[in-house]
Amino acid sequence: MLSGGSNLVVGLALSLQGLGQMITPMVGANLISHRSRVLPIGFVLGSLMRLCVLLMGLAGFFLDDQATLIAVVILLGVREPEPPTLRAQTSLGQQLREVPALLRAEKPFRRYIVARAIATMGRMAMPFYILYAGQTIGLSGEILGIVTFAFTMSGTFSNLLWGYLADARGFRLVMLITTVLWILSMLLLLVSTDFIVTVIVFVGIGAATQGFENAARNIVLEFGDRENLPVRIALVNSVSQVTGSIGPLLGGVLSTALGYESVFIVSIIFLGMGAWLIFFRIPEPRRQSGR
């Protein structure tokens, strides 16, 4: 609504959020990789993220629409880094120089980075689900509340299922299942304009995106040694956020030029490619590491 209905601005805002998420992981890893206690850094970064959300709310109260739009775009994408193991302090430049050797030594992890980056392009459709629903079934306050509730609660409660499945069979399987669920939900959104079906679609997308993101973050912990864990986490987050930054911008361009359906079709293609790579090219890391 702040964008005045511009799909391009919506895509740009999400692209800039991804850009912020792309830049911060390696800096965060460098800040904490040598520390025995990382909680204080987590408090600082977590507080900064919450401050951004607070400022978004205050902007809505005190600024006009144009200024609020600019403020919201600027304030999107702070990411708290994952806690690492202790290692000797090195410079950021030294850690960056270690990356090529790390990738050469760990082929499954290298393939995972590629697969996750491709699948993350499927997120390009995220800001447009609700806009498409508004176009097909109308978007009153009541309908917006229902589909938002369905999306949020399905993501929350499905975590119990995804967590149990990940404990029993591994995060790789969760990524595959949630990617397939995500694709099926988008296909259903394309073929039906019924209100009940749309709610079911948002349940499926909410559960799928939440499960995929959680599994994609946690599976990184199962690759390689623990000494290089901070760099590994930062690297995969940075690479995936490159596509996470490009995706929404591309989605905005596609939706403006060709309509929302084209965004969903391209998103399905990227998700399918990511799932194919995970299934055929990446072995279960628990079997490789003996965990």
Image: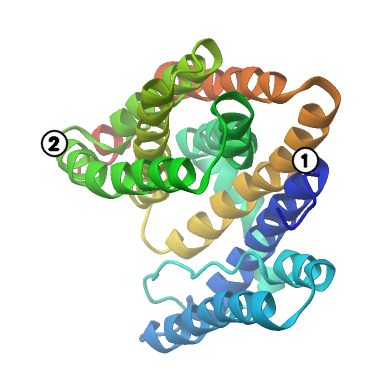
Q: Residue at x 50, y 22 (%)?
A: 186
Circle 2 residue = 168
Q: Find out whether the residues at labels 1 and 2 contact each other: C-beta distance under 8 Å.
A: no
> Which residue is the extreme one toward the top?
191
* Residue 205 relative to residue 10: left or right: left
Residue 199 in picture, x, y percent from top left: 38, 31
- Please tell me in which quadrant of the rendered image residue 85 appears: bottom left
Q: How is the image coloured?
A: rainbow
Give the mark nearest the N terminus, 1 or 2: 1
Circle nearer the viewer, 1 or 2: 1
Whether residue 156 is situated above or below residue 202 in the rendered picture? below
Left or right: residue 153 versus residue 92 is left
Q: Which residue is mark 1?
A: 7
Task: Indicate the secondary structure of the residue bearing disc 2.
Answer: helix
Q: Position of residue 209 (x, y in %)?
A: 43, 39
User: How far apart are the alpha carbons under marks 1 and 2?
Assistant: 41 Å
In this rendered view, identify the residue nearer to me: 54 or 149.
Answer: 149
* The image quarter in which residue 291 lies: top left
For the residue carrying disc 2, how many other residues have a C-alpha within 10 Å: few (<14), some (14-19), or many (20+)? Answer: few
Q: Is residue 179 above or below residue 240?
A: above
Q: Amino acid at mark 1?
A: Asn
Which amino acid type is shown beneath numbered disc 2? Ala
Q: Quadrant of residue 135?
A: top right
Could you tell me if residue 117 is visible in this image?
no
In the image, is residue 122 above or below residue 30? above
Q: Secondary structure at mark 1?
A: helix
| Residue in the image at 42% along x and 89% along y | 40
Q: Residue at x 53, y 61 (%)?
A: 231
Q: Is residue 5 above or below residue 47?
A: above
